[in-house]
Amino acid sequence: MSHRSQTRRTTRLFHATPARSIACSLAIGGGALVGCRTGGVPMAPDELSRSSRGPAAGAASSPAALASAPRRDIDMATAVESFETCWELVNENHFDPDYNGVDWAAVRVEFAPRAAAVTTRAQLRNLLNEMLARLGQSHFGVMPPGGWDEPKENAAQAEDGLSGLSVRFVDDSYVVTEVKAGSPAAAAGVQAGWVVDSIDGNLVTSAIGDEVPDHLRQLVAERMVEERLGGAPETAKSVSFRGPDDAPREATLTLERDRSSKVSFGVLPPITVELSHRELGAGDWLECGATPAGGGSTPRVGYISFTAWFPSIAAAFDQAIDEHRGCDAMVIDLRGNPGGIGLMAAGFAGHFVQEPTNLGDMIARTGTIHFLAQPRTVAAGGRAVKPFDGPLAILLDSQTGSTSEVFAGGMVDVGRAEAFGGPSAGAALPASLATLPSGDVFLYAVADFRVTSGSSIEGVGVRPTIEPAPALVDYRASPDPTLRQALQWIALGAPPRPAATGTPEN
Amino acid sequence: MPTPRLSRSPRHLSALCACLASFTIAAGALAQAEKQPTPNQQPAPQPAAQPDAQPADLPTVDAVVEKFLSAVGGKQAADGVKQFTMKGTLTIPGAGMSGDLTIWMASDPERMIMKITLPGMGDIQTGIVGDVGWQSNPMMGTTLIDDKDLESMRNESKGVGSDPRTAFDEVAVVGIEPFEGTACVLLRCSKGENVSTQFYDRESGLLIGSRDKVSSQMGTIEATTVIGDYKEFGAVKVATKFTSKTMGQSQVMEFKDVSFDPIDDSIFALPPEVETLVKQKKDKGDAAAPAASTANETP
């Protein structure tokens, strides 16, 4: 059982996210990767024909698409109005007057006729997302109301089935980085460190369409593999692995119903928002392979993990901090955390700073907002408290996005924390939401985020500061090599980082 | 002590709402700090609109303000309002969020509490009681508003529909320009880094919009607000709908009920978290004072 498994950490924040909606899903929680939505999928070419791309994806107005198009559910006027609204919101609000090097006016000329030709909302979504992908940035995307994905045909399909696996692309392999305790994967004996070779007989590959920006390709690939591991509850997934010795392992995972705690927030679909925390014990150190310095006793380390930055966990976070305030060090695990409400990054950071500290600036056309962390010196009820001032380790991976990157990047940049694992997604553009005339929800970035030293996180991510991110060999040696690195750093007395690490350079 | 007035949008609320609706960003941040252009940042539009034409017979500031005050019931009626409660809703249409909004305001001593309850977000409160100002929300906890921002917000609290001549250091009529299709007289008002261009309906005299540049400890943002749906409550006329746009996000405040009934003092009681922060601030000040004194005494 891994450390994170014990914490009931939910890894599939955005349930059932096929390629077409990945961008959208990541947007809110973590760096809306819109732009990469119609990208190729990490599966063998022969499977592309039955990929989960939406109807008429990327070909909304082609004769073939129109010939086989489903029943019209949007009139031309609404489609055109939705297109114009979408285009204009970007035109008016994009933080970069050069639109990231894209001739946005020319994009309008190119796409407007195609928008007039769509016959379904799904086609329009695909078209708009194709247009937005031209920007090559996170946090631009159109999604159906009420869900990240295209509406399911029946209730059973609408439910999520979970395997309990988290997979990350490491050293050209899809590595199992977490097996959720009690999950089908755990029951089948799958272990962290195994490499996924195929799912239901189809090889997983790292082929990603050219439309996906370079910095988002790994994230999209990982999400696609996790998507392939998902499905309706009770679905049996046949998965081929390679174990630590490269020996083939087979497992059949019967997906379990997603029972995670979901919250609603405005037009966003229900999102799994869970937090867990505990003080790491000697068993945790032993399991991940960390050892106390000089063979002495293990430092007291508080560990907090949460799945997204939404207000429903704020009180729990405050309480967790309170419970571990007396620890020697703290670990904040943001792996797989795609973000949420940006304000919370500054609010949470206030638990770790002794003076007002700016995590960075949100820079829009019409102003700049500082992510100012005010020391949290009072607890609910009026009790005076002291912000935690011990060593702080933040755990990252490639699916750490958006608000998580704001928090991590800002804290690393000001020298208050060290980062382990990663680099993070590099998808950290503050964004707003709008509802289009078609009824779809449009997420669009309105600002860049730059840490105090001036670097942008978008496209770069937050890098590990003490050691390089774990390689495949490390995952095979430890069920949680990232946590091991953090604990070793703490055990050594939290030495300062080597020069020129962590902060994005751009 | 100034009398609370009723027909201008609390500008800091616009900023708050815009931020709250900004996913992955620092929502809730009441903007602040100077503008810091960056290489890829388009120069922000000047909040003070440049009118297309400036007739030679522009009205004076006094004439514009007096006409406005007359339009909302007269200065005497407005001065007669010593306290009020406004209840309504705050909606962020794009985000699909809507919740309750209540503002309590009283003078002698000056007090203001604004409470927003948004589903999924919880309670967001801003308060000013005398020299103490605070903000509280689930994400940021409770924090005191720094002195500079407090002054600005107190000014704003006075100025909910107030006389811009007292709310700002500089006020000037800068032209005539249509706003939302209505011919308006423009007043450019400024105080420190805060700049407000106010649009007064040339015919009715009512304030129907503003473009504001609001600075605070957390940055500077610009907002455009459409003010409307004036309704009579007692002897005064009150704007009941404020639609603001900030950083690409619109938010709508609509007030359904305005009451001039006495407000229970308990509404304005400092929350225990605020009391603690005030004590900490005082202790910090007391601790710093001797040091400063010592420094001054250094030969």
Image: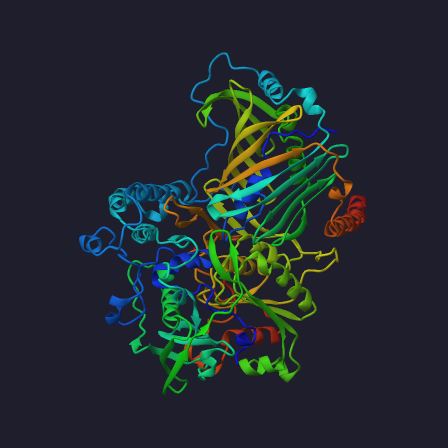
The image quarter containing residue A136 is bottom left
- Side (left or right) of A407 relative to A21: right
Q: How many marks?
A: 0
Image colouring: rainbow
- Side (left or right) of A495 relative to A240: right
Decide: is A253 above or below A104.
below
Q: Which residue is drawn at 64% across and 66% down?
A: A320
Decide: is B136 above or below A306.
above
Task: Work out whether residue A470 or residue B299 is closer to the camera in this orientation and state it.
Answer: A470
Q: In which quarter of the image is the C terminus of chain A?
A: bottom left
Q: Residue furthest top?
A: B57
**Residue A73: % across, % down:** 31, 49
**Residue A207: % across, % down:** 29, 68
Q: Residue at x 25, y 70 (%)?
A: A45
Task: Work out whether residue A104 or residue A118 is closer to the camera in this orientation and state it.
Answer: A118
Can residue A496 be seen here? Answer: no
- Side (left or right) of A77 relative to B178: left
Decide: is A6 above or below A334.
below
Decide: is A2 above or below A59.
below
The image quarter containing residue B113 is top right
**Residue B182: % across, % down:** 46, 23
- Side (left or right) of A142 relative to A380: left
Can residue A261 be seen here? Answer: yes
Task: Work out whether residue A251 or residue A397 is closer to the camera in this orientation and state it.
Answer: A251
**Residue B175: % across, % down:** 49, 20
